[in-house]
Image: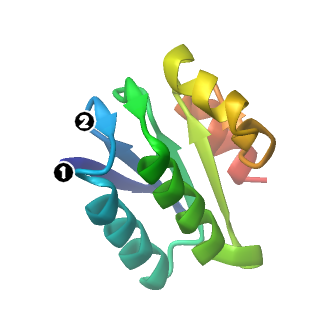
Amino acid sequence: MEIENRKIENILVVQPMEKRIDASVSTEFKGRMVDWINAGSRKIILDLSYVDFIDSSGLGAIVSSLKTIGNDGDLVICGIKETVMGLFRLTRMNRVFQIFSSQPEAIKALSI
């Protein structure tokens, strides 16, 4: 799975470059997220602007990443497409995650 990541001050921006986060890549995705969190990343922006589809295992990997961070950090989402947002609404994950339309908005929110 191709994932781009970069640091902006103390914020890690993670951007999957795949169209799908599903059972075939969710384990690798979760593993890489946990590695970044264990390495000290506590403020993470997950940019889903390339992602068209997330299944239950992909959503589980994202939720697991949030749980791994715990109360001493935050995982926010930006660039979410309407097809993926439908899943977040259906599962009520739109109430669990802060969702921003763009990276600059998410960066601003986490910089406070």
Q: Can you identify the residue that label 2 sits on?
A: 18
Residue 108 percent coordinates (x, y): 69, 41
Name the residue rendered at 38%, 23% in the picture: 52
Quadrant location of residue 92? Answer: top right
Q: Is residue 37 above or below residue 27?
A: below
Amino acid type shown at disc 1 = Met
Colouring method of the image:
rainbow
Q: Is residue 98 left or right of residue 41?
A: right
Q: Residue furthest left?
A: 1
Q: Is residue 24 above or below residue 19?
A: below
| Element class at badge 1 | loop
Labelled pair 1, 2 in contact (Cβ < 8 Å)? yes
Badge 2: few (under 14), some or many (20 or more) residues near its Cα, within 10 Å?
some
Residue 100 percent coordinates (x, y): 66, 31
Q: Is residue 84 left or right of residue 1?
A: right
Real-space Cα separation, disc 1 to disc 2, in angstroms: 7 Å
Asked if one can make out residue 112 in the rendered structure from this viewpoint, the answer is yes
Badge 1: few (under 14), some or many (20 or more) residues near its Cα, within 10 Å?
some
Q: Earlier in the sequence, mark 1 or mark 2?
A: 1
Name the residue rendered at 69%, 30% in the picture: 90
| Element class at badge 2 | loop
Amino acid type shown at disc 2 = Glu
Quadrant location of residue 98? Answer: top right
Residue 8 percent coordinates (x, y): 48, 53
Q: In this view of the protein, which residue sits in the foreground, 95 or 40? A: 95
Q: Can you identify the residue that label 1 sits on?
A: 1
Name the residue rendered at 71%, 29% in the picture: 89
Residue 18 percent coordinates (x, y): 24, 36
